[in-house]
Amino acid sequence: MRRRLPPLACSFLLLSACQDDPAGDSASAASPLGGLSDEEFELALDLGPLGAPTPDPTNAQAANPTAAWFGRYLFFDARLSGTGTFSCATCHDPALGWGDGLPLSEAAGQTTRHAPSLWNVGHQRWLFWDGRCDSLWCQAIAPIEAAHEMAGSRLALAHAVADAPDLRAGYEALYGPLPDLSDPARFPAVGRPVPEDPDHPEALAWASMDPDDQDAVTAILVGVSKAIGAFEATLQTGTTPVDRYVAALAAGDASAMDAALSASAQRGLKRFVGDGNCHLCHAGPLLSNREFASAGLGERPWLPLDDTGRYDGIIALQASDFNAAGRWSDAPDGEAAGRIDRLSLTSEQLGLFKVPSLRNVAQSPPYMHGGHFDDLTAVVQHYVDMDEELVLGHLDDFMLPLDWDAQDVADVVAFLEAMTAEPIDAAVLEPPDRPLP
């Protein structure tokens, strides 16, 4: 069965439908083009290397090394949470591929989705599995105030920054003097907007404040988040075996090609850019088209049945005070802002989730938006079987079972594992010992 998939129809983790491929034990030995057709050759060259992300114009601190340093300090700091117990690193642990190794994340409570890896997140145009944020700094805000994540509030955060000499020093180096928050009548200890529950004690405390004071507090939340976003944009993977293979392929160096990738991984690459058409979703050096798709997933006992994915993500993004077109953006009339109005909210968006990058994918199991599968073999086997009853939305007619055997599955897994990068500077994997360089 040969299936040609449009970009938004293939799976959000890896494979669209694929064909058997009788490649031999050494793909590169068969042809100066690595056993690839001309089209496959060009697609393979597009898989690497991955350059640095373009700085986000909605965040004036995005390219500031001092902001990134302070953001790294904040990322690991539990004082940002309501209880002083949880940090961003609770659910995005560098030792676990910037995930947490759990099907559903756990901090102050349990979330309803799996924590995605943060590797190369600066290349993404939409954040969260449903795309409800369009910048890293927008994404950093929500967990701070989410009751089941860091369980904090913007007022508590503002006081924590103002009261701690190290946090104050880092913040004021970037944004200037903090406002005087010492009057408890003007600035209660805790408080935040709670649109879904206006009678919540923290919502009442927030509503009691003067609008200008509310803005002063929100500005601190935004400033902290923009520093964290600047740090997250630095989480770039290094060179992978696939990158070395692509360079050798471009040079026509068959010996270097075989040195870079095993025969199994080469066969898996051929499937990826060939009959499998996996590249249509996992495209280019990022191995993601940065959009949304259905993977044909059925029920899991630990997941809600009413998760609409991208559909509600669009609604939340357009309503957010922190989107690229909002007043907290540093480029409210820029390109990212213009994308918001062009989003189309239709039933076609139901049940779609973001297509993640596959770089370093082997480091961050389990997989899919709900931690559906424990390992990559199970993920690939899902696309071989395609026997789950979809929870929500629809699956395109061409997403059919595959005529694959165990070796085919193993070859694709070998290719995915070869997307694991060489170690990067260990400094970014740990908190700095001071808030400023």
Image: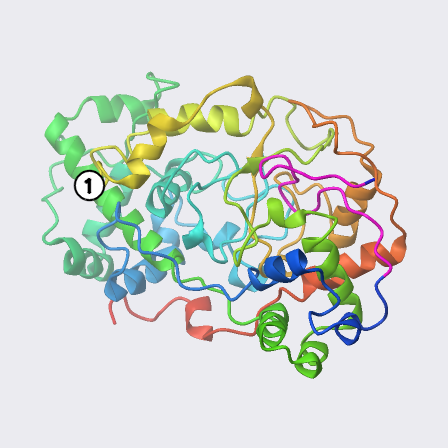
Q: Determine the residue positioned at 17% across, 57% down.
A: 174
Q: Quadrant of the N terminus?
A: top right
Q: Is residue 329 magenta?
A: no
Toward which corner of the image does residue 268 lie, by quadrant? bottom right
Left or right, 169 with respect to 344, comes to left
User: Can residue 18 be seen in the rendering of this structure?
Assistant: yes
Q: Position of residue 400 (x, y in %)?
A: 80, 34
Q: Determine the residue positioned at 63% across, 64% down.
A: 419
Q: Position of residue 413 (x, y in %)?
A: 75, 58
Q: Is residue 3 magenta?
A: yes
> Which segment did they paint magenta?
2-22
Instruction: Classify mark 1: helix, strand or loop.
Output: helix
User: Can residue 87 be seen in the rendering of this structure?
Assistant: no
Q: Position of residue 277 (x, y in %)?
A: 68, 47
Main SS, magenta region, reads: loop
Kindly identify which residue carries mark 1: 219
